[in-house]
Image (cartoon, rainbow, N blue to C red):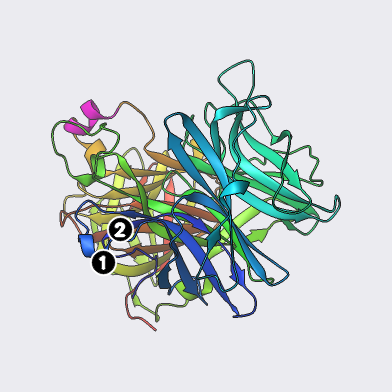
Amino acid sequence: MNLFFTPDYAKTGDVIPFYNEAAGRFDHYYLKNWNPDAPRDKVVHGWHRISTTDNRNYVETPTGIRGGTGSVILVDGVYHMFYCTFDWNPAAQWARHAISTDLEHWTDIPEEKFTADGVIYRKSDWRDPFVFWNEEEQKWWMLLAAREDAPTERDGCVALCVSDDLSHWEYRKPLYAARENQAAHECPDLFKMGDWYYLVYSNYTDGFCTHYRMSRSLNGPWLRPERDTFDGRAFYAAKTGSDGKDRFIYGWNPTRGENIWKFDPQKDYGNDYKTWNWGGSIIVHKLHQHSDGTLGCAPVEAVENAFLPGVSAVYQSLNGNWEQEGSTLRCVSDGQFSCVLAQPLPELCRVKTTLRYTGRPAQFGVALHMDETFSDGYYLAFEPSFRRVQYKSGLRMNEEGGKMFPYAVEMERPLALEPGKDYELEIYIQDTVGLMYVNRDLAFSFRMYHDGKGSRLGFFASEGTLEVMNTTIETEQR
């Protein structure tokens, strides 16, 4: 069973969502990044179509289209694919157009390719075209990852072009240009939910995330919500798709280990301490809208319903005063780090638990794939004073980690924490992929290359009082 799609011998890159209404299924596309050891007779470059009815199980078909991210629309019985290609001498990026009548056989229209104008937009970046019909203006709009002609290098933007016929495009000023990032706003996407428009884009400078902005109008202003991301560092290039009922967002959880950026430490500490690759496994979140228009993420039904009821946790106290009454484990941690272990975690499972704290803890949370001494493992640490939950890997706890890491936070998600409130956690694990949902609203993806160092589930608290309630480990599959 797979929870998160990972192709054989390859990694999933950017997903291009498309709902095939006639077939009653999603016919998504994605950019396939083959592993260095992939058998040559299996390698087929370019876009690959992945068909699914549940956003978990996929049937894959190559398309023959070679290029970068884009979008697919259906107009009067003809499918239109917009994608991008790259020239290196001279350097240029091009928006391209192809058509099909069956989603399988595509005909490129080379005379319609076009690049940045060199006036409003710099020639260096022009990719990831996203095309949609603007009902108000009665024109086709195309959004692109671009860099504007700005007074500083903080010129990343979402470019805008318009058309009457999907073939001839007029340049306009950027739809969104905050002049904040020093790289193009990649994989732009736009949708409407209720009274709000949402602009989605990804950026890898001053962070590495998929962001969103909100507006009551396509003409702006585009507002930045307090939590303007869908997930963390290990969820990128995300775009959305809808079946007319629900809207989902698709991103990739990157693998590690190929050292493509040449940043890995000289000594091999294991893949946890190597740099991220481009591409990995597809993570899908189901989006929902809060009363103020902001967005939250929950698991898709096919992932949520993949398991049968599990076994209750059985605890072994290591540090601190842990007391159990029924399905509730309670610890008053006074002036020390308190920790407890539970059963080993299988390679494929879901952990469900509820945490509640009182007092002023420095941190509390869940440990995954922990060893018997509570040393080597992974920490999902809730930190009320920082208003966040942080992911920490085990090496940072010992002397080598203290020398190695030049930063205080490995990965984090903003989360305003309140004493006395219940935090219901669902943690999905598939091999090295990890994904936690908090109260079915906040998503946090990560990777764990534990290499057999530890396997136990655990909990911890530093100061304050922690209650751990109704913890189960689910392994049996529906």
| Residue 440 vertical placement versus 310 (above, below) | above
Give the residue type at disc 1.
Glu
What is the x, y in percent for residue 149? 64, 22
Q: State left or right for residue 229 relative to residue 74.
A: left
- Label 1 crowd bin: few (<14), some (14–19), many (20+), radius 10 Å: some
Q: Residue furthest left?
A: 267
Query: Can residue 15 be spotted in the picture?
Result: yes
Asked if residue 71 lies in the magenta stretch, the reply is no
Left or right of 220 on screen, residue 446: left
Whether label 1 touches label 2, CB < 8 Å:
no
Q: Is residue 270 left or right of residue 448?
A: left
Residue 68, image x, y percentages: 48, 48
- For the stretch drawn in magenta, what is the main secondary structure? helix
Q: Quadrant of the C terminus?
A: bottom left
**Sequence order check, earlier mark of 1 and 2:** 2
Q: CA distance from mark 1 to mark 2?
A: 20 Å
Figure check: 77 above or below 355: below
Name the outermost residue toward the bottom: 478
Residue under circle 1?
Answer: 347
Q: Tell me the mark number nearer the camera, choosing from 1 and 2.
A: 2
How many numbered marks are there? 2
Within-10-Å neighbours for mark 2: few <14, some 14–19, many 20+: some
Residue range corresponding to the magenta coloring: 400-405
Helix, strand or loop at mark 2 = strand
Residue 187 visible in the shown view: no
Q: Residue at x 25, y 45 (%)?
A: 272
Image vertical order of residue 447 relative to residue 73, above or below: above
Looking at the rendered structure, the kind of residue marked 2 is Ala
Residue 10's tag is 2
Quarter holding the N terminus? bottom left
Residue 235 x, y percent position in the rendering: 45, 50
